[in-house]
Image: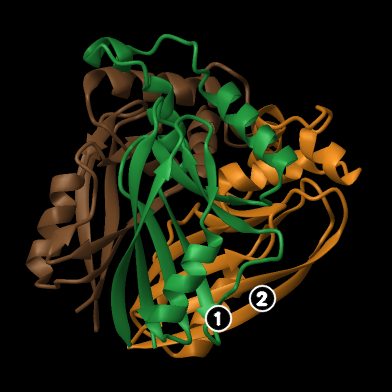
Chain colours: A green, B orange, C brown
Amino acid sequence: MRVLNQRIRLSTKGSGDMVDITQKLSEALASSGLRIGSLSVFAVGSTLAITAFEYEPGLIEDVRDLYERLAPSEKRYAHDETWGDANGFSHLRSAIQGQSMTIPFEDGRLLLGTWQQVVLAEFDTRARQRELVVQLIGE
Amino acid sequence: MRVLNQRIRLSTKGSGDMVDITQKLSEALASSGLRIGSLSVFAVGSTLAITAFEYEPGLIEDVRDLYERLAPSEKRYAHDETWGDANGFSHLRSAIQGQSMTIPFEDGRLLLGTWQQVVLAEFDTRARQRELVVQLIGE
Amino acid sequence: MRVLNQRIRLSTKGSGDMVDITQKLSEALASSGLRIGSLSVFAVGSTLAITAFEYEPGLIEDVRDLYERLAPSEKRYAHDETWGDANGFSHLRSAIQGQSMTIPFEDGRLLLGTWQQVVLAEFDTRARQRELVVQLIGE
């Protein structure tokens, strides 16, 4: 059994940007040489999230609408008063969605479904440089 | 330390079916012989989810209502246009709830609360054959 | 590779109490002597949750409002009929938020962002004694 940490660094375009990271996770797994175990992806930050869904333009639009209903971007939030900031909605979406996901692998392959892509959901109001920790535990 | 993957295969009855899988997870743990570690259950697919709640008829009804308010089944979704399909709401509920859960175990027993059952939530519009990966890491 | 379980026990003040547990998690990690691996925190129970957000008074208020919109405390729930209880909303908030979180660590330090505090969200209607399992896997 071994544990390995890797990093994925990428640029996002601000609120509503949904980045399919499935391929990068598969590459991280391949480079580890591990065959069976657990891959966890963890987003460092509090205005983004990790989720999984069928990555196609229609559903991407639906997911954006869902987050907008959950925490409307035009609503006033107490957090915005604290910092003179305007990303209270970004924090709420991140808190409810969660910032990590754990996926099993076997025979060196992630056990995802065909329509189950892993997605970084950017909620912040501006473009960001993001760091994801990919942790592999297995043998 | 060892890592083991098992599979649970089961049939669901379509949208709103909530299946208590706690007993099956306990059996997977027992068959592994592991005493301390981590059990992760991962649902392969994008129109179902894993959650945990007190599995009793009243709360099952409440949980269904919650999902219906989050992503109404009668709403029109862009995803439905993409495929001429009608399960956009199923995908959204899966994305927000999440498709996995990690539970610690000790002395060969899952450390769940008395009223904390692990539940497969089926959101798809039709009956499905489902595969869950149960991954055990421990010793 | 080793696996270690620890417990955090704490008192909460009932619905809406948000307890920053980040420091306690860091102490659990320090006491383990592990340098690289995975920390999972798991809340035993079905009327509380684990989440992460910037722990400041404005956002705490916003998070409370979000949960209130998701599962209003004044709504009638079928669960309340079952037990003559009144915490149906507590169960729903717990189910949708989730009762655990997994965080990678490296060099003996949790890889959290600066504004990413780990929070126990109490949803039950009364003060509770809570037990969290902190599981460390690594080397």
Determine whether A83 is above or below C88 in the image.
above
Residue A16 shows up from this direction = yes
- The amino acid at mark 2 is Ile
Indicate the position of residue A136 as horizontal and vertical percent values: 37, 74
Residue C85 shows up from this direction = no
Would you say the residues marked 1 and 2 are in contact, meaning their CB atoms lie under 8 Å apart?
A: yes
Reading the image, the residue beneath label 2 is B8
- The amino acid at mark 1 is Ala
Q: Residue at x 58, y 82 (%)?
A: B6
Report the front residue among A50 and B31.
A50
Q: Quadrant of the N terminus of chain C?
A: bottom left
Reading the image, the residue beneath label 1 is B28
C-alpha distance separating marks 1 and 2: 9 Å
Q: Residue at x 48, y 85 (%)?
A: A36
Q: In which quarter of the image is the C terminus of chain C?
A: bottom left
Disc nearest the viewer among 1 and 2: 2
Can you tell which quarter of the image residue C72 is in?
A: top right
